[in-house]
Image: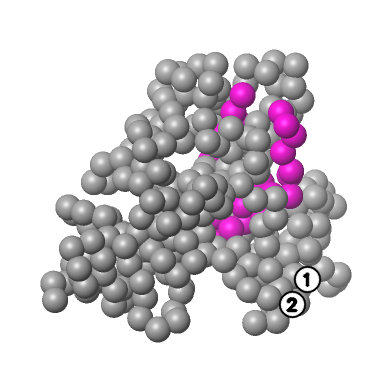
Amino acid sequence: MEKTIGTIIAAHGRHYLAQTDTIKLQCVTRGKKSDIAVGDIVNLQMTSPNQGVIESIQERSTLLYRSDQYKSKLLAANVTQLFIVVATEPGFADDLVSRSLVAAEASGVAAHIILNKIDVTESLAKTRRRLAFYASLGYTVHEVSARAAPEATCATLGPLLAGQSTILIGQSGMGKSSLINLLVPDADIAVREISAALDTGKHTTTFTRLYKIDADTAIIDSPGFQEFGLYQLTEGMLERAFPEFAPYLGQCKFYNCHHLIEPDCAVLSAIKTGEIASMRHALYQQLLHESSQKLY
């Protein structure tokens, strides 16, 4: 049977849809393996004109995933950047934004914050003040309004997306769907095709899907979620995922300092002087605690 290479553009349970150069193939894995993510490039064995078996996954450049105490959930593979979509209203959770930034840093993925619905002016000043904190850490905040100013939104985001594989994440209600429909021509048709191919019925909002814009550009839409567990990150990965810690790492009295209660800790000293925000250190402590609770 013919062999080919494809990119996984959607997954539902153990059923996958792969895009090759010419066609979309419904795929399954051999055995019970299901550690395949949207964005994975896979080697396929065709079993019929529109079906195939995934033989292997090609090496990933990046892998984004979230995890709780018991299991991990792959978000996407081979992404180059993460867009965290927030809005003027409804209010967004700082915890989710902060955890998303940590996940991006730990995975080697560039992160951008997209502030949508800037036409809702009564909440704009307050939202800008909240996001100024992330800008002070070095993350760029891009202001758009997908519905009120679609052309300006495309002009802002289009150049950022070109040549990249970008995943959009955010809580429900932030306008992520409006952005996807604006940035991806015929997104609704693509979703219907995917749903039909994977036989998902109406549950199109519960799975991640990839849209190929051109040979070098892809946009990945993920389901809205409220929690972003990072139980998989080790202590070493965590301390390096906070860019503002970088100048102080290796400066502590003890080489194996955990930056929690140790004497002469450079990170704790930087918190006292205001160089590191106490809110960020509290998140670091929480994530460190979570990583010690992992049961798998």
Quadrant of image for the C terminus: bottom right
Which is nearer the eye, 94 or 68?
Answer: 68
Identify which residue is drawn at 65% across, 35% down.
Answer: 173
In the picture of the structure, the residue carrying the numbered disc 2 is 292
How many marks the image carries: the answer is 2
Say what secondary structure mark 2 lies in: loop
In the rendered view, tell whether residue 275 sits above or below residue 59. Answer: above
Identify which residue is drawn at 59% across, 28% down.
Answer: 116
In the rendered view, tell whether residue 98 sits above or below residue 117. Answer: below
Identify which residue is drawn at 46% across, 73% down.
Answer: 35
Say what secondary structure mark 1 lies in: helix
Amino acid, disc 1: His
Query: Are the residues tagged 2 and 1 within 8 Å (C-beta)?
Result: yes
Residue 143 visible to an observer of this rendering: yes
Which is nearer the eye, 125 or 255?
Answer: 125
Hey, which quadrant is residue 211 in on the image? top left
Residue 250 visible to an observer of this rendering: no
The stretch in magenta equals 89-117
Q: Which mark is residue 241?
A: none
Which is nearer the eye, 208 or 296?
Answer: 208
Amino acid, disc 2: Ser
x and y, in percent, of residue 151 in the image: 42, 18
Q: Residues within 10 Å of mark 2 (few under 14, many from 20)?
A: some
x and y, in percent, of residue 48 in the image: 20, 68
- Asked whether residue 104 is drawn in magenta, I would say yes
In the rendered view, tell whether residue 221 sits above or below residue 17. Answer: above
